[in-house]
Amino acid sequence: MAEFDILIRGGTLTDGRVADIGTRGDRIAAVGDLAGSTAGRVIEAAGDLVSPPFVDPHFHLDATLSYGTPRINASGTLLEGIALWGELKAQATVEEMVDRALSYCDWAVSMGLLAIRSHVDTCDDALKGVEALLHVRDRVKPWLDLQLVAFPQDGFFRDPTAQANTIRALDMGVEVVGGIPHFERSMEEGRASVRALCEIAAERGLLVDMHCDETDDPLSRHIETLAFETQRLGLQGRVAGSHLTSMHSMDNYYVSKLLPLMAEAGLAAIPNPLINIVLQGRHDTYPKRRGLTRVKEMQAHGITVGWGQDCVRDPWYSLGTADMLDVAFMGLHVAQMTAPEEMRRCFEMVTVENARILHLEGYGLHEGALASLVVLDAGDPVEAIRLRPDRLAVIAKGRVVAEKARNDSRLALDGRPASVRRRHRPRAAG
């Protein structure tokens, strides 16, 4: 009879199997039929979905939860958001950034989001955001993996401080190289920034995650340069292009050339559906473009694609709850991924696919993996996207860090049940 620290009994895994999971220390010790085992803590999943934790590959922790300070983005555009962020970062303090970021991490943990890649602005001689998020990274490390991207928000060449300060940020311990080529003064400077930043990553052995072609302009084609530099420098499998919204406006012939180049270079793509559909198409009348990149087409070419959150309550986005299932829900709709296998893939795009993009070690629900998982009030991944359900239990590195009681709605209807739960399984045919 085995003894575990935590035993989750009778959960439905994301592949449909019903199994028990036993943990010891910070690792999963066993998965299967663990009848007769004992544990210091037993969680009765009883058919509830048990998933590895949610992962967000694209976020901005330095700006989060700042909505309305110093003002609201009146136009709702990306460019006004960038200008507003410039005003905000000039007056923000390290302490205030730490407080906002830690509050968001609390939200994230409550939603089973246990790994985040956050871009941090390096166009600031004081590097307040870098100092703040390095502190937050250390503070949350026991329960949340925070990966930081050195991000020259105002342009690597466009901003006079960006080049030196991006290097300073990497020297301070930021572990991913970022960029924003479409925001440089010219297409040529954009291409040069991709080249220079990829060379920095290659020299230092770092990953790359670049805001790339976040525009409605079909001639913004820096993703092509990113694929080329990835090949030239041997960075295959270590580079991601975020947003890629210009691709929704490109002609199909060019895209037919571009997608094989991206696949050959081993690029990953990170669309951010909540933010992309809000910020893009603002200059359109009708038809109005929605700004989401070509998700299904990239996946058909074997390109790894993961959904990102991007923003919550900040200069660019007024809503958000740290729920990656909200992101998957919106992405499913905008990308029209409604076939059963496509809906399941949307769940994978906020779990295993994003973990792959972040190069997370020990991720999953297998023996030897980190004991980090989520119990959801749903029966399978598609139902989880439909309901965006309560997280009944969140376990991070062998410790229960969040719990919520099941909360069925009570009814007072003649001749009907006393309570209702919106979980639903279709009747078998025949």
Image: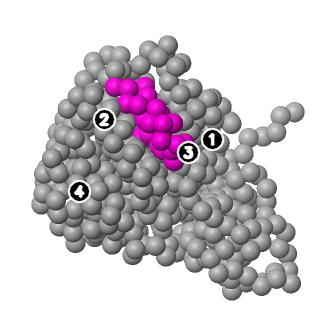
In the picture shown, does residue 252 fall above or below 311? above
Circle 4: is it few (<14), some (14-19), or many (20+) Cα within 10 Å?
Answer: many
Q: Residue at x 49, y 61 (%)?
A: 115
Q: Residues within 10 Å of mark 3 (few under 14, many from 20)?
A: some
Q: Which residue is mark 1?
A: 345
Please tell me how crowded label 2 is: few (under 14), some (14-19), or many (20+) other residues with Cα within 10 Å: some
Q: Earlier in the sequence, mark 4 or mark 2?
A: 4
| Residue drawn 68% across the image and 36% down it | 340
Q: Which residue is mark 3?
A: 237
Residue highlighted by disc 4: 165
Crowd tier of the residue under label 1, counting other residues whose Cα lies within 10 Å: few below 14, some 14–19, many 20 or above: many
Instruction: Estimate the x, y position of residue 241 in percent, counting from the top left.
Output: 44, 39
Q: Nearer the viewer, mark 1 or mark 3?
A: 3
Amino acid on which disc 2 is placed: Ala
- Residue 269 seen in the current view: no
Disc nearer the start of the sequence (1/3): 3
Q: Is residue 260 visible?
A: yes
Query: Which callout, 3 or 2, points to the residue nearer the camera?
Result: 2
Of the numbered discs 3 and 4, the one sitting upstream in the chain is 4
